[in-house]
Amino acid sequence: MLSLERRATDSQLMQWTSPLLALVLTVITALGLFIALGKDPIEGLTFFFLIPLSDAHGWAELGLKMAPLLLCAAGLTICYRAKLWNIGAEGHFLMGALWASVVALQLTEHNGFWVLPAVLLAGALAGALWAWIAAVLKTHFHCNEILTTIMLNYIALNLLLYTVHGPLKDPMGFGFPQSEMFAAAALLPKLIPDTRLHIGLLFALLAAVVVGVLFTRTFVGFQLKVLGQDNRAAAFAGFGSRRLTWLAFLLAGAMAGLAGASEVSGPIGQLVPQVSPGYGYTAIIVVFLGRMQALGIVLASALLALTFMGGEMLQIAMNLPKAITGLFQGLLLFYLLTCDAFIHYRLRLRRSPPPTNAQEA
């Protein structure tokens, strides 16, 4: 019979091959799903992975969808390396988008160079303050951050829906729940002409670099890692857990809030209810798939961005439901967590014990 046996030391091989194995298992499962739906599996995978990147426009769209994922994932990496399980990137993202929109609409009559920085700063601050609520609840009231951040996500979503259906609703928008279009001064410059790709991608790549430097070159990063590995050791060394918790949450909130601000100031140009297709939640998969490393989350965010594009392509080309994107992402997370178990455990074949005399009788 098979049983799980704890390894004496964690497997470094499985640490790095687990994401690849999870991806392979996800693709194999996807093949089975296409067959079950009566679709050509090879055609389905082609539309999902290859067709979206068949031209320069597709690569630009990949960068566009990669930017918010990478920004959210960079912030979550800081929290997760410190074993602070922040599930609230979606809420930080939505609050950043909301308050960036408020500032952008208030500054419609202004054309100064300072308008765009003000909009982005408003988004980052809003995300940071929203994350700060969860940090305070954890450090002062010992509330579980998983529960509080999830609940704050729903509060943020409903606040955004209220404002876009109410105070910020465009009176000339024919009744649609959307704000007015932002002025040109509040929009992000394009990186590539004739595409939607904007400089938000540069913000995201810079955030990944900041995370890499933070954990490899700074004392604060060392403190965060110690806090994550052993909070008693961190306390014994004099590392303030409350200060580090606040710092991790504030940075995560600011990065996700900046992602939300970049989204409304970039490809959308206004506030709409569907500002996020779930970037904050998908960023959690990015962090684990990228092994909480700077380069890893860059590559993982590109892969998960491709799943959004591939899902849209399957809706158009093969008439599959929108849920196919979430299904693929969920399968990837499931297989990743399953494969990660073998970092710490191995399968062992055990022989059944021979029957005793009493059993033979």
Image (cartoon, grey):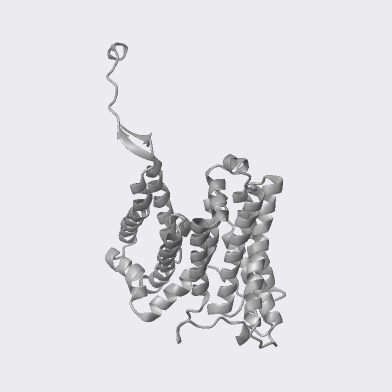
Residue 65 in view of the camera: yes
State the residue at coordinates (45%, 57%): 293
- Image location (x, y in percent) of residue 225: 53, 50
Image-quadrant location for residue 127 = bottom right
- Image location (x, y in percent) of residue 178: 63, 77
State the residue at coordinates (37%, 80%): 56
For the N terminus, the image quarter is top left
Who is closer to the viewer here, 173 or 356?
356
Q: Is residue 341 left or right of residue 230?
A: left
- Figure disc tally: 0
Who is closer to the viewer here, 49 or 210?
210
Examine the rendered structure and indicate whether residue 246 appears above or below residue 234: below
Q: Is residue 131 left or right of residue 190?
A: right
Residue 169 in view of the camera: no
State the residue at coordinates (66%, 46%): 143
Who is closer to the viewer here, 108 or 174?
108
- Image location (x, y in percent) of residue 245: 63, 52
For the C terminus, the image quarter is top left
- Image location (x, y in percent) of residue 97: 62, 71
